[in-house]
Image (spheres, rainbow, N blue to C red):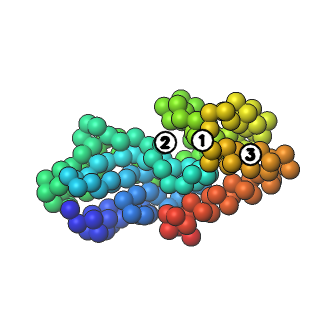
Amino acid sequence: MNKRKIARLMCQRIEGLKQSGGYFFHGEFEHVLRGVLLEYVPRGMHLWHFRFPLLDFFGENLLYSNRFSSGGFIARDELLEEAIVDRVLAHPELTDALRPGPPTSLQAFLQFLDGSEAMLNPHAHLVYASGLVLDWQGARAIDVMEQILPQLSKRDVEHCHRLQAELRQGADTAIALLDEVRQKNLRAFGLT
């Protein structure tokens, strides 16, 4: 599997597609990157429908993403690069993730999170609260952070306390903090 050739073919076949490592997504986004991840492993490649909120303090992770079990693995040397790209682009669950259109809105991501298995992870609640801050729902964000605080990891507790402190100074201050987080994540994906 020639990763560079696969990346080049993916970007040639879908107009406006951006790439960072194995991540492929449209260039139009606000707070959420959404697209396809080609996860290369020694035996081949796993396909993911990835979602990543740029407001996540932790940085790049797949907590909000789905790895496909049905048709989601391509064994090394099973297909040539052109056929790999054909298979990725024909995968029914990935077609939507790569379709051009309006970016995933913050509200749509919050709705997705609300019913997602990711919410079993306390960290996702901190991201949910951060999204509420950006959506000008500071009071709800404070409630979510207070409820989840005892379950957070030490690192998340630090981020939660910082976001709470900024929110007490005003929504604009908290939003500025989340913009710093967004900029850090954009740099990690090579988008600045």
Closer to the chain start, of discs 1 and 3, is 1
Residue that lies at the very extreme toward the right in this rendered image? 169
Q: Residue at left 21%, top 49%?
A: 74
Residue 31 location, x and y as percent? 60, 52
Q: Which residue is mark 2?
A: 64
Look at the numbered disc 1 and give the secondary structure of its residue: loop
Q: Are marks 2 and 1 in contact (CB under 8 Å)?
A: no
Q: Which residue is mark 1?
A: 153
Q: Which mark is residue 52?
A: none
Closer to the chain start, of discs 3 and 2, is 2
Number of residues whose C-alpha sits closer than 10 Å to that of mark 1, classed few (under 14), some (14–19) or many (20 or more): few
Q: Is residue 59 left or right of residue 6?
A: right
Residue 109 location, x and y as percent? 57, 41
Q: Residue at left 43%, top 64%?
A: 20
Identified by mark 1, the residue type is Ser
Q: Is residue 110 visible?
A: no
Look at the numbered disc 3 and give the secondary structure of its residue: helix
Identified by mark 2, the residue type is Tyr
> Observer-nearest residue: 86 or 62?
62
Q: Quadrant of residue 150?
A: top right
Q: Which mark is residue 161?
A: 3
Disc 1 vs disc 3: which is toward the camera?
Answer: 1
Number of residues whose C-alpha sits closer than 10 Å to that of mark 3, classed few (under 14), some (14–19) or many (20 or more): some
Q: Is residue 112 left or right of residue 4?
A: right
**Is 22 located above or below residue 106 in the figure?**
below
Number of residues whose C-alpha sits closer than 10 Å to that of mark 2, classed few (under 14), some (14–19) or many (20 or more): some
Closer to the chain start, of discs 2 and 1, is 2
Residue that lies at the very extreme toward the left in this rendered image? 78
**Is 183 located above or below residue 156 in the figure?**
below
Identified by mark 3, the residue type is His
Q: Residue at left 80%, top 54%?
A: 173
Look at the numbered disc 2 and give the secondary structure of its residue: loop
